[in-house]
Image (cartoon, rainbow, N blue to C red):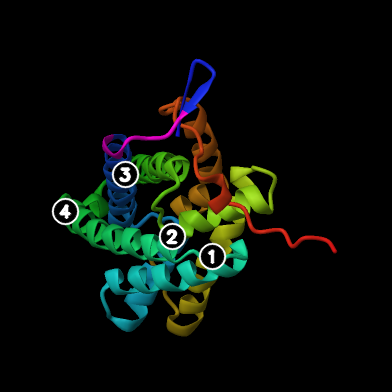
Amino acid sequence: MHHSDGQYFELSFKQFLFYFILSLTLDALGNGLSVSTNLGSAPWTAGAANLAHLTGLPIALFLGLTTVLVATANIFFAHKLDWRRFFGNILFGVLFSLLAGVFTSLFMVFHFIDYPIWAKVIIDVLGLSTIGVGISIYQRVNVILHPIDDLTNILRFSYFHGSAPKAQMSNFVVGVMISLVCWLLSGTVVALNVGTAFAFFCQGSIIAWSDRYIFPSLVHGNMDKSHKDIPKQS
């Protein structure tokens, strides 16, 4: 939804397509950058990377599995079943998993892992910040979202009074726990480092900042989908 001169306008299909492609690309690109530095990814991506390291299976498989499980959990947190939104979550998650895999493979060619530590930190923070900008855009469009970011939207507006930092940190706790379990089982951990801490504590603030300054006329639409149904009092 767009806000202009005190009025609100629904997005046209072309506008939706533009924001959708842009935000999906930013999200996947940022994840690819963060994974390629091995200085810490966003917690859910780090969890998938550690599951892939533990099992030897592709990271895209666990990113896709996470998509289905979190999309299912969103039904319970929102207290409503919206099949169009559920399958939209799945579609976004699949597209993201594939595109993130492409960007990760692309950036591995540059061998960022061999760069000086200060350069890797800059690249990692840049990647994680790019993720936050992408999330902000498609959360405001609020039509098709990655289920993890849909969960943040639900938590933000139904449980944390609009606070993006509190919602994002609460969301990330599970992703961190997955990595810790993998560490206990294997004795090693990947993609969990200073960048993960940056994402945990700062990505919600980046989303809130982007809401204000990146496409500021774009405001949260379809808010009924981001709020749980409140049972009526008899």
Q: Which residue is mark 2?
A: 85
Element at badge 4? helix
Q: Earlier in the sequence, mark 4 or mark 2?
A: 2
Where's residue 36, x and y in %?
27, 55
* Mark 4 to mark 1 CA distance (whole Å): 32 Å
Q: Residue at x 50, y 66 (%)?
A: 175
* Mark 4 to mark 2 CA distance (whole Å): 31 Å
Element at badge 3? helix
Q: Is residue 189 visible?
A: no
| Horizontal side of residue 89 vs 232, given as left or right | left
Examine the structure image and report whether residue 13 is included in the region drawn in magenta: yes
Q: Residue at x 66, y 59 (%)?
A: 229
| In front: label 2 or label 3 | 2
| In front: label 4 or label 2 | 2
Badge 3: residue crowd in 10 Å (few <14, some 14–19, many ≥20): many
| In front: label 4 or label 1 | 1
Segment tinted magenta in the rendering: 9-14
**What mark, if any, has residue 74 been given in the picture?**
1
* Mark 4 to mark 3 CA distance (whole Å): 22 Å
Looking at the picture, which amino acid does disc 4 mark?
A: Leu
**What mark, if any, has residue 106 been given in the picture?**
4
